[in-house]
Image (cartoon, rainbow, N blue to C red):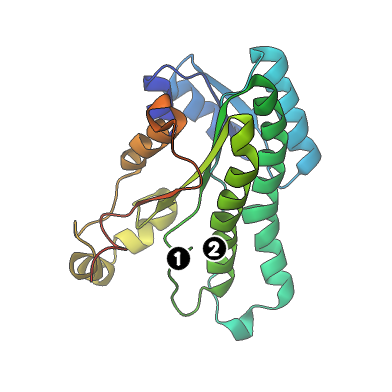
Amino acid sequence: MAGGLIEHGARVWLAGRDAEALARTAAELGPATVACPLDVSDLPAASAALQRLLRAEGRLDVLVNNVGQRHRAPLSGLPAEALRELMEVNLVAGWHLCREAAGVMARQGAGSIINVTSIAGPIARAGDAAYTTTKGALAAMTRALAAELGPQGVRVNAIAPGFFATETNQEMVADAGIQDWLTRRSSLGRWGQPREVAGAAVFLASDASSYITGHTLAVDGGYLAHF
């Protein structure tokens, strides 16, 4: 997503907890990228990072909330504290950044917020209740903030990725059984590649989507639509 936005003229502040990995990625993406070491669940640090950005750039046009954690376990293995921990990262951190960014964007009279949810928002599977709950809540938050911020010129949308071959999912990507499942269960019959989510981010960030808000765009190879 960062690469796609940069290709279309954006200057991107890239956040992450691993400063070394972040620096490498920023170097790969080029001079339009600023590495911003940050744990978004540290709310004061997130606020301070936004202030640094504003001092350096003078404005904020787009916020992409793309941090998420997962805890796969049956309900019996998920005490309330496990859900609370996921909520802090998957929902509360995003809420805080949306709130901080919305004030800036409203003063500018325009802005686009993009929350990255999941196809686990509208559908569910056994053994993943906490993650599904947080992603469903993030989709609901997207609709609620779109309704509230629209009159101020701020659009709020979401991207719901399906099965993507990310570093985190490499073990699953190598599983022939999961590949067989995707072949039968999705229209395109394969894993998505990370670059294939970039277009959705560019679209929702740009004026090409100027009359779209409160929408969750599934980027899932037809998984949700396929019977």
View extreme (right): residue: 44
- Please say if 164 is above or below 154: below
Residue 27, percent across and down? 48, 21
Label 2 – label 1 distance at C-alpha: 6 Å
Residue 86, percent across and down? 65, 62
What amino acid does circle 2 point to?
Gly
Give the quarter of the image for residue 202.
top left
Q: Callout 2: helix, strand or loop?
A: helix
Estimate how packed mark 1 is, as few (under 14), some (14 to 19) or many (20 or more) residues with alpha carbons within 10 Å: some
Residue 206, percent across and down? 43, 27
59 or 80, nearer to the observer: 59
Residue displayed at 45% across by 65% down: 122
Q: Which mark is residue 50?
A: none
What amino acid does circle 1 point to?
Pro
Q: Is residue 47 left or right of residue 24?
A: right
Residue displayed at 44% across by 30% down: 210
Residue displayed at 61% across by 53% down: 141
Contact between labelled residues 1 and 2, with CB atoms less than 8 Å apart? yes
- Please say if 219 is above or below 24: below
Residue 16 shows in the view: no
Q: Callout 1: helix, strand or loop?
A: loop
Q: Quadrant of the C terminus?
A: bottom left
Residue 46 shows in the view: yes
| Residue of label 1 | 122
| First in residue order: circle 2 vs circle 1 | 1
Residue 153, percent across and down? 59, 29
Give the quarter of the image for residue 152.
top right
Q: Quadrant of the N terminus?
A: top left
| Residue of label 2 | 136
